Structure formats: structure tokens, C-alpha cells
Amino acid sequence: MVNKEKVILMTKLAAYEQGEGRKVIPIANYFRSDYIGLQLLRSFVAGTIAFFAIVAILIFYNFEKIMQDVYNTDMLAFAKKIGIIYGICMVIYLVISYILAVYRYGKAKSSIKTYYANLKKLNKFYE
Amino acid sequence: MSSFIEVKESAKRIYSKYDAYINPILKFLLAVIVLSVINAKMGYMTKLDNIVIVLVLALVCSFMPMQIMAVITGLFMLLHMYALTVECAIVGGILFFLMFLLYVRFAPKETIVVLLTPILFLLKIPYVMPIAMGLIGGPASIISVTFGVVISYLVEFVSSNASTLDHVEDGNMISRLRMIVDGLLANKSMFIMIVAFAVTLLLVNVIRRRSINFAWTIAIVSGVICNIVMLLIGDLVFEVNYSVGGLLIGNVIGGLLCSILQFFNFHLDYQKVENLQFEDDEYYYYVKAVPKVAVGVPNKKVKKINPNRPPQPQSHNGTARTVRTANGTTRTIRK
């Protein structure tokens, strides 16, 4: 016999899993600190690649000038300067990523509440 | 007005019922338009400038998520730039790369904004973008619109300087690269556009979120006015010579397009017909879940009763009878 209530419940669960839940469930499966940590790590990698890509373009763009001045420049000071700019950029980018990750995690957790409640109800059919 | 609302409601009903078919068709049409416009404006790679390729790619786009369409369009642009000069492709590629790396990770849905902006620029109505994104996006959409404007100006610079770029001697890659970057950075018009669009987007978004009557309409109108004023001020201060007529007409068309968007705004989380498959220990279920609002609203027929209609003689049912009066005229007496 098909159980009507169970079918309705399962339909709701499946609709959530295939719709909104597709993005939310993977987020909600993490612990809060794990999710935020992972996002920050990704941002760090992406930000670093992007920063050095920009630096590479700037060097390429000013190639002739840099080649002329190469013996007159204090390489250590130059590297220090780039390091400071890199640090500032990364802090800004990571703060933005952190705020976004916290916001997303909170939103995912509140979105998934009904889903978990329905899962519990479904579980009762098997007890 | 009520007929407009009826049209909207029936459109909504049809869309929520058949969106499994309508969405791919719309995506297909969008992809055909986008790719054809790119081909028409920057068809440097003759192999790509072919309707068969456009149709095949559009077909692929129609079954894929929007992000895939964005990637395909981006590659399409890059290939055309590559055919012109490698340096264009490098600059464009780096722009796309930075955008994907830094921003798209957070807002993958906005990728399409970045690619639609150049298309709207080519169609001379980029003014739609800040207003539309202010209405349906958030303040963060400023970033995607800005990227879109930069890419539009890159495309414009490339197409207007195609012959010059072609004639710079082959070996000198750095000078060509410098020429492109300088051309882009020296373009005041681009920076004015970016600032004007950012302010407009923010203003539209702030007004749209207010809980006032007609918030959407007020947002659109003030967006159009703000855009025009900002661009004209920029034009006066930096003397970039925008075509004032084009600016005014483009903005008004942009506003009109946004009112259509407002009219058909389906609140994005509309309920749709779901076709689901799942199983338990005993059965496989193939369920079609139809939301109650999407079920056809019964067609109500309202019978009009006209109060001014002259009374009909009703002799046969016995409720009224005609009598002759003393002065020779006839009168109907109702019981």
C-alpha cells in the first residue's frame, strides 16, 4: 500500500533537494568553522594568484623601464613594498570573504531547518 | 489596467507550467542574439563567423546552466580578439581570469551580467544594466556591471583600432600590449560610465528596497534621471563628447525596458511544476507536483446587468397586464 502522507513528505524533501537545497545542503553539512576556514583558504589561493597575475602584467607593461633601472633599484626595498601591498590587499579580500562566508552559512542553516524537520518526520515512519 | 494584470497572470501561469520548455528556448534565443552580435561587431576569426557554429553553440547553451553560456561567450570573444592580435586576447583573458578568480566564486549568477553589458553597449542601450541590476540585484552587482563596462570598452577599443593594431610591427609585443592598456586607461568616458552606473545602481537599489507605494516605478524613473544627469555632468567636466540625443533616447529606452522587467517580475522564487523521482524500500515514485497557484484559475464569466434597459412587456407569465385607460392610451400594470 502506498502511504499518502509519506509520499507527500518525500515529495517535499525531494523538491528541496533538487531545488534550493542543491546549494544549501553541501554548506550545511560542514561545521561552521570548517566551512569558513575552507572558504578563507580558497580566497587566499585565488587572491594570491590574482595578485601575482596583476604584478606580472605590471612588470611586463613597464618591462623596458625596469630593465633600464635594474641595476639602480634596491631589490630588497622593492620586494618589501610589493609584500606590504600584497598583505593589505589580502587582508581586505579575506575580510570580505569572511563576512560573506559567515552570512552564507547562517542563511544555509536557517534555510535547511524545515528540511531537517521533515526528515525527522519521515524517520518516524520507519520506527 | 485590469487586462494588463490578466495578461501578467496568464503569462505567469503559462510560465510556471511550461518552464521546462520555455527556459531552454529563451536561453537558445539569448545565445543566438549574443553570439551573432559578437560576430557582427568583432568577426575577426572568420571560422567562427558562421551561422552553423552559432546555432550549435546556442543549442549547447540552451541545455546548460547560464554560467556555461557566460564561459562560451567569453571564449568566443577571446578567440575573435586572438585572431586580431594575441595581445588583445591576453588583456581580455586576464580581465576574465581575474573576474572569475576574485568575484564569480561569490556570485556565479552574475557572470551573465558581465557578458550582457558589452552586448547592450553594442546595441547602444547599456543604460538598462545599472537600473535592471539595481532592481533585481544588490549593491554588489556594481562589481559585475563595472567589469562589464571595462570589457565593453576593451571591445570598442579593439574594434575601432583594429587596423592600427594590425600594423604595429609583429615582433613588438610589449608596445602593442602597452597601446591597448594605455588606450583603455586613458579612456575618461569609461571611468565616467563606471561612476555613473555605480551611483545609479545604488540609488535604484536603495529606492526599490523602501516600503513605499510604487517603489519600483520611482526607482526606475529616478535611475533614468540620475544616469542622464551623471553622464551629462561627466560630459561637461571632462569633455568626452557623448552624443546627448543618443544618451537621452538610450536612457528612456532603458527605462522602458526596465518597466517591462518590473511588469513581468515573477519574484524569482515563483512556484513551479516539479517533476520528481525518488524511491523508498518498496516503490519507485515518479511524482509531478503541481503548485496550487499554478492550477488554472477558473474562468469566471460575469453577466452584465444593464439597469437602464427599458422594461420588456411580460404578458405571458401573468405578472403584468396591459389595460386601456380612460383617455384612450394603454398602460402596463405590474403586480
Image (cartoon, coloured by chain):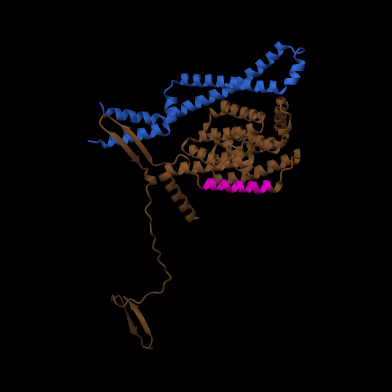
Chain colours: A blue, B brown
User: What is the x, y in percent for residue A94?
Assistant: 57, 21
Q: Quadrant of the N terminus of chain A?
A: top left
Magenta segment's dominant SS is helix
- Residue A82, image quadrant: top right
User: Is residue B130 in view from this perspective?
Assistant: no
Q: Is residue B137 magenta?
A: no
Name the one closer to the observer, B124 or B133.
B124
Q: Residue at x 71, y 14 (%)?
A: A78
Q: Residue at x 30, y 35 (%)?
A: B285
User: What is the x, y in percent for residue A40?
Assistant: 53, 20
Name the one closer to the observer, B198 or A76.
A76
Q: Quadrant of the C terminus of chain A?
A: top left
Above or below: residue A38 compared with residue B271: above
Name the one closer to the observer, A12 or B213.
A12
Q: Is residue A39 left or right of residue A2?
A: right
Tell me how many marks there are.
0
Q: Residue furthest left?
A: A1
- Residue B114, image quadrant: top right
User: What is the x, y in percent for residue B85?
Assistant: 67, 31
The magenta stretch spans which residues?
B246-263
Q: Is residue B135 left or right of residue A116?
A: right
- Residue A62, image quadrant: top right
Q: Residue at x 51, y 22 (%)?
A: A39
User: What is the x, y in percent for residue B175?
Assistant: 73, 27
User: Is residue B311 in view from this perspective?
Assistant: yes
Q: Residue at x 50, y 44 (%)?
A: B265
